[in-house]
Image (tube, grey):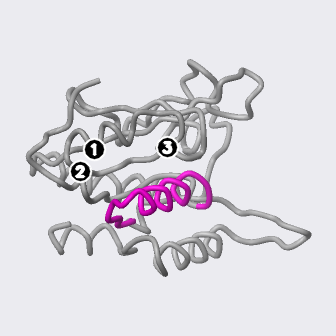
């Protein structure tokens, strides 16, 4: 793993933009709604971070068992999608839990680099993005979430079907209430992050 650039205190955190979440990826095991559009916005942020020499951290999820429904160990579906793939020198954290901080060295990597603020993008909004944002805020990081650079899917609970757009809105409203600044990728770029 390569060290982050220690001269900057803001890092881009890309969560689980992996092939199994992309409907256009042949054989995707858990396609989300709007993954391609979210990754496109995430790629815009990624380009800005790279141009400005700001730190970038990719997080990739693999379940520890081949019986998992998606992100199987060593599978192509568990690889980071080519649209936002890591470049040489960018940190990639492998996780096996929903919360990217749990049982990984993510916090150590960020703290060793002096990171104080995180710009968070990725999938799924209602699981891993939500979990990492709440955990990061609890650990004292200032968080911003690019809502249009995150993707989720339709859910159902107790017979109530919830479309992905409503899942997205509910989770972003919750994060924006107390855990993060929630804005579009363009807004975050315009505000110089």
Q: Earlier in the sequence, mark 3 or mark 2?
A: 3
Q: Closer to the camera, 70 or 8?
A: 8
The residue that appears at 71% across and 63% down in the rendered structure is 154
Q: Quadrant of residue 41?
A: bottom left
Secondary structure under the numbered disc 2 in the rendered image = loop
Tell whether 109 sits left or right of 37: left
Say which quadrant the N terminus sits in: top left
Provide the residue designation for mark 3: 100
Cβ atoms at labels 3 and 2 below 8 Å apart: no
Q: Which mark is residue 64?
A: none
Residue 82 location (% of width, % of height): 38, 35
Cβ atoms at labels 1 and 3 below 8 Å apart: no
- Give the Cα distance between marks 1 and 3: 15 Å
Stretch of the chain drawn in magenta? 126-145
Provide the residue designation for mark 1: 111
Q: Quadrant of residue 37?
A: bottom left
Secondary structure under the numbered disc 1 in the rendered image = helix
Residue 114 location (% of width, % of height): 20, 47
Main SS of the magenta segment? Answer: helix
Q: Is residue 142 magenta?
A: yes
The residue that appears at 85% across and 73% down in the rendered structure is 160
Dot 3 alpha-carbon crowd within 10 angstroms: few under 14, some 14 to 19, many 20 or more: many
């Amino acid at each position: 793993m390569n060290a982050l650039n220690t001269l900057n205190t803001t890092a881009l955190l890309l969560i689980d933009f992996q092939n199994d979440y992309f409907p256009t990826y042949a054989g995707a095991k858990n396609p989300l709604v709007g993954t391609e559009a979210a990754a496109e916005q995430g790629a815009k942020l990624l380009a800005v971070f790279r141009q400005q020499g700001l730190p970038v951290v990719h997080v990739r999820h693999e379940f520890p068992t081949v019986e998992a429904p998606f992100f199987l160990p060593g599978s192509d579906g568990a690889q980071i999608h080519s649209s936002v793939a890591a470049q040489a020198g960018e940190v990639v954290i492998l996780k096996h839990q929903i919360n990217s901080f749990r049982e990984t060295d993510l916090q150590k990597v960020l703290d060793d680099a002096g990171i104080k603020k995180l710009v968070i993008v990725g999938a799924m909004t209602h699981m891993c993005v939500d979990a990492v944002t709440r955990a990061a805020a609890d650990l004292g990081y200032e968080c911003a979430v690019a809502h249009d650079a995150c993707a989720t899917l339709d859910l159902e609970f107790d017979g109530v079907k919830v479309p992905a757009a409503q899942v997205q809105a509910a989770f972003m409203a919750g994060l924006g209430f107390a855990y993060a600044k929630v804005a579009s990728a363009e807004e975050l770029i315009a505000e110089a992050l």
